[in-house]
Image (tube, rainbow, N blue to C red):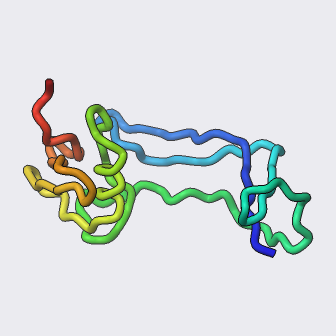
Amino acid sequence: MAFKKITVGFVVQHFNDRGQCTFQEFICEDICEYENEKGENIDNPENEIYQSYGMVQPSTQSTSKHLRIKPLLIGGVLRCCSSTLESTPVEEKEGEILSCKYCEKSLIFKNGNWQSNSPKQ
């Protein structure tokens, strides 16, 4: 039987003096719930195989063509724009512009971070 495991916990993120996340970890509590594919609560499945709560760590590289966690100033950035950023390989060169796949807005790589390229209102 397919199922979902919902775990209560929190994320601790460590940032350097430039505001970039350098490490993150998930701290889970002992509270877990299980659901079937229809979203209905179920008892703990007998066939559950342990899965680590390890998180993908931020890259230490300044540029990368591979998918990774990217530095993003979140003010004024729509969820669809951040989703576009996380799913798109980018060079991270100063002034690089990335158009959102879902709306008319775009992001710009400026001062070591991705940020909204829309004029502030």
Q: Is residue 119 left or right of residue 70?
A: left
Outermost residue, front side:
38
Quarter of the image containing the N terminus? bottom right
Q: Is residue 51 shown above or below 100?
A: below
Q: How many marks?
A: 0
Q: Position of residue 82 (x, y in %)?
A: 33, 50
User: Of all residues shown, which one is farthest toward the top?
Assistant: 121
Q: Nearer the viewer, residue 1 or 91?
A: 1
- Comparing 5 with 51, the one in front is 5
In the rendered image, residue 49, in percent from the top left (x then y), is placed at 80, 72
Q: Position of residue 27 (x, y in %)?
A: 68, 44
Q: Is residue 107 left or right of residue 77?
A: left
Residue drawn at x 48%, y 39% is 14
Q: Residue at x 42, y 55 (%)?
A: 58
Q: Quadrant of residue 46?
A: bottom right
Q: On the picture, is 79 further left or further right than 29?
A: left
Q: Nearer the viewer, residue 120 or 65?
A: 120
Residue at the limit of the structure toward the left, as seen here: 95
- Which quarter of the image is occupied by the C terminus? top left
Q: Report whether 69 appears left or right of 23.
A: left
Task: Answer above or below: position of 47 versus 63.
Answer: below
The residue that appears at 83% across and 45% down in the rendered structure is 30
Residue 9 point in image, percent of width and height:
69, 41
Residue located at (33% from left, 53% from top): 70
